[in-house]
Image: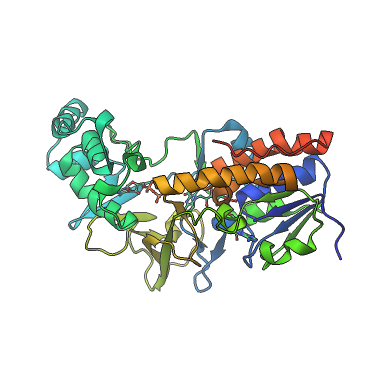
Amino acid sequence: TSPRPDLVVVGSGFFGLTVAERVATQLGKRVLVIDRRDHIGGNAYSAPEPETGIEVHVYGAHLFHTSNERVWQYVNQFTEFTNYQHKVYSIYQGQTYSLPMNLATICQYFGKSFSPAEARALVAEQAGEFDTAEAANLEEKAISLIGRPLYEAFIRGYTKKQWQTEPTDLPAAVIARLPVRYTFDNRYFNDTYEGLPKDGYTAWLQRMADHPNIEVRLDTDYFDVRDELPSDVPTVFTGPIDKYFGYEAGELGWRTLDFETEVLPIEDFQGTSVMNYADEEVPYTRIHEFRHFHPERDYPKDKTVVVREYSRFAQTGDEPYYPINTPEDRAKLERYRELAAKEAAEKRVLFGGRLGTYKYLDMHMAIGSALSMFDNRIRPFFDDGGALDGRLDD
Ligand code: FAD
Ligand code: UDP
């Protein structure tokens, strides 16, 4: 049997692996990482599609981008990045437009060349119907930002498919910053750094775990083995917080995605990595064509992999992907946060990551948040042997 760990980490996603890597390399402590899946890496995991060798992001397309200098320095220890810059297009009523909404989208949609000032004036006129500050729901907010015609074309149908909820019943916050650019810039992200891991996400994730002080146990559900673990060993839990507490305050709501993968006998299906489908009648929200994430690679010329993405409410047993965050969810989360603080004080369990905090975190945010947990709570705990500070970040 393996030696007693100094720390147990539940979940081998970016949050769990960042904590494990820091504790192993900076403190020289032994870490046991447990994951219920049969692979490392959480939702960022990717694998070559067997027939083509094309790298597929198994839990949905993952684009790395950050403006956080520390996170960028940190991740570059484990992987090089390509110079991939994400761009997204949208098909609406048989025409292909560029996203996020920019001058090209506006000119094409209205069938006319506009200067930036003319486009601004046009959108302002069409957006006058609602005041952004007073918008009561997603529809009003979107119209107040981009006007009704562009809203109806690019947002309404897509949003209905993504949320299975009328946009008038969705909180305005879902679309807090709907960018409209009055230039032809159509880069999807505004961050300082962007790229894809040169030899794939899984190689990057494995390098984080590759240390003699780190033991990874896959195919192992924490709830099945917790009784066999030393009861006083500190634990970082990155699984679902409501499940940890036996759904004591009720189940938190999530959306899940279904992916339909197809290998086609052609070199190129859509000419780009992500195509959104704005029409409500098309059942999927978008199609990913994975070869386009790595144009630098030597992929087959006679085959391509496309993945259609469908969105729906998660039922028990589905993978939780996006927190829904209704007012009821917020109330339940408040209760779980109190329980989490108590669990830290009494049982040395800290909660982190997307599922552990019920927060949508991009990869750079999960990594940044794990680095902060290491600095502010885990290192002091091991240095001084004090209590664990279990408050969840806001
Ligand atoms: P996860 O990666 O979910 O890892 C949690 C791990 O805990 C899982 O491996 C799970 O199996 C394990 N676990 C849960 N319960 C138990 C248990 N009881 N016992 C043992 N193990 C358990 N971020 C970006 O920056 N760019 C993107 O383009 C992007 N796209 C995304 C697309 C989708 C569809 C989704 C869902 C997320 C996307 N993200 C993206 C976010 C990214 O996936 C997260 O930031 C990252 O996965 C967070 O890591 P984590 O460690 O918190 O959680
Ligand atoms: N959205 C939309 N049309 C699009 C893309 C996005 O209406 O073509 C809206 C939709 O409501 C979605 C939100 O913007 O839920 C956020 O979209 P994003 O693509 O950023 O979400 P993610 O990639 O996380 O699913």
Question: Residue 274 placed where, x, y %?
Answer: 37, 54
Query: Splitting the image into 4 quarters, where does residue 92 fall?
Result: bottom left
Question: Residue 271 placed where, x, y %?
Answer: 34, 57
Question: Residue 142 placed where, x, y %?
Answer: 25, 39
Question: Residue 358 placed where, x, y %?
Answer: 52, 48
* Residue 180 showing in the rendered view: yes
Q: Nearer the viewer, residue 121 or 246?
A: 246
Rendered position, 264 above or below 241: below
Q: How is the image coloured?
A: rainbow
Q: Nearer the viewer, residue 115 or 99?
A: 99
In-image side of 331 versus 114 (left or right): right
In-image side of 21 versus 333 (left or right): right
Total number of numbered labels? 0
Residue at 52% x, 43% y is 334
In-image side of 195 versus 14 (left or right): left
Q: Quadrant of the N terminus?
A: bottom right
